[in-house]
Image (cartoon, helix red, strand yellow):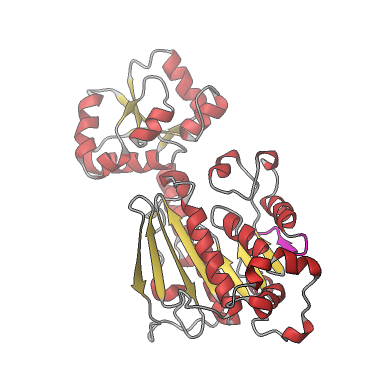
Amino acid sequence: MLNPNLDEIQLSKDDYERYSRHLILPEVGMDGQKRLKAASVLCIGTGGLGSPLLLYLAAAGIGRIGIVDFDVVDTSNLQRQVIHGTSWVGKPKIESAKQRILEINPYCQVDLYETRLSAENALGIVEPYDIVVDGTDNFPTRYLVNDACVLLNKPNVYGSIYRFEGQATVFNYEGGPNYRDLYPEPPPPGLVPSCAEGGVLGILPGIIGLIQATETVKIVLGAGQTLSGRLLLYNALNMSFRELKLRPNPERPVIDKLIDYEEFCGIPQAKAAEAQQQANMEEITVQQLKQILDNGAAEYVLLDVRNPNEYEIAKIPGSVLVPLPDIENGDGVAKVQEMLNGHKLIVHCKMGGRSAKAIGILKEKAGIDGINVKGGINAWSQEVDNSVPQY
């Protein structure tokens, strides 16, 4: 309801007091606050981006907020997902978010969709809302959200984060570009590390999420210049902002239906290739690794391919660090060859993915066979030695 009948919307006495700082802004005023009250916004995800934008959309007076998420709160979330608290660890994120929203604004209608957004349910979930805010962290869902918004003609307020950098824009608004104009094709699976692998400054999603909230409110109010046609890039380390122009691509394929986005992003193919690689690769459990180490490991070299800062956090006794990037660029291959000197190679990382990749590279470049540790140091911490920190 981006153009509601304002005569039908009434502000209560509490509204006048609660939104007094809005009401005295000429760009908001009575009509603007009524627009916010009449507006409905769907947020996909209650993670790093969804947390701050949900808090501020509720505080701003958005009348109806929908939340899509199927995850539970984890302790590692609390460094950046500020809508959740310690008492909610292990419980559904959407329930945690709803309770916090209603604490801020008890007059907000909060709709919960505890499900994974898919091609089967996306149109039905998106359709009732005026604006969609994308707080997801994976490419299949971003393409799905984009295409659903295009098919239903909904503005898509986009943000993404990684390490110390973030970006934000508005897609599919007033004839502007959509996500496929920025990324016509998805990157190969695994090329862009997740925040769980690469890390993220906890404050960063707060900044990008608040930019998304600001753009959402501006669209509702019809005020100011939105980021449609502009990609805002933010670097927290340099404290710098810059913009790139975005334009619709007249040659882009027409979006006329939702598709299999996992397939489109190459994920089943990547999983099949990974499964084939693992089938051809010797693996051991962390319990088997413990037996080897307890027996002295005289025939083995235990290689850790995580990053140096991860090695400082936690390590398996007797392991030697050669980071995966060094193996990928070739420098680490000779180092591993020198270390082996007739010994057998066991390789581990955080969860088992990077170590499998390292073994594949060592086999291809130097004919070195390696044994992968299933579950990596996370499994070691959970099943063998819980004094080793998990991160």
**For residue 296, above or below residue 348:** above
Q: What residue range appears in magenta?
A: 106-116
Near-viewer residue (20 or 286): 20
Q: Residue at the spot x=54%, y=57% of the render?
A: 49
In the shown orientation, is residue 101 left or right of residue 377? right
Residue 167 lies within the magenta run: no
Residue 280 locus on image (x, y percent): 40, 42
Q: In this view, does 346 lie to the left or right of 215?
A: left
Rendered location of residue 126, percent (x, y): 65, 73
Q: Which quadrant, please, contains the N terminus?
A: bottom right
Residue 183 visible? The answer is no
Residue at the (70%, 58%) spot, across then down: 114
Q: Looking at the picture, how far across and down is residue 108, in whole percent?
A: 74, 64
Q: Which residue is drawn at 57% across and 77% down?
A: 27
Question: Residue 12: x, y in percent?
Answer: 80, 71
Q: Can residue 320 be seen in this view?
A: yes
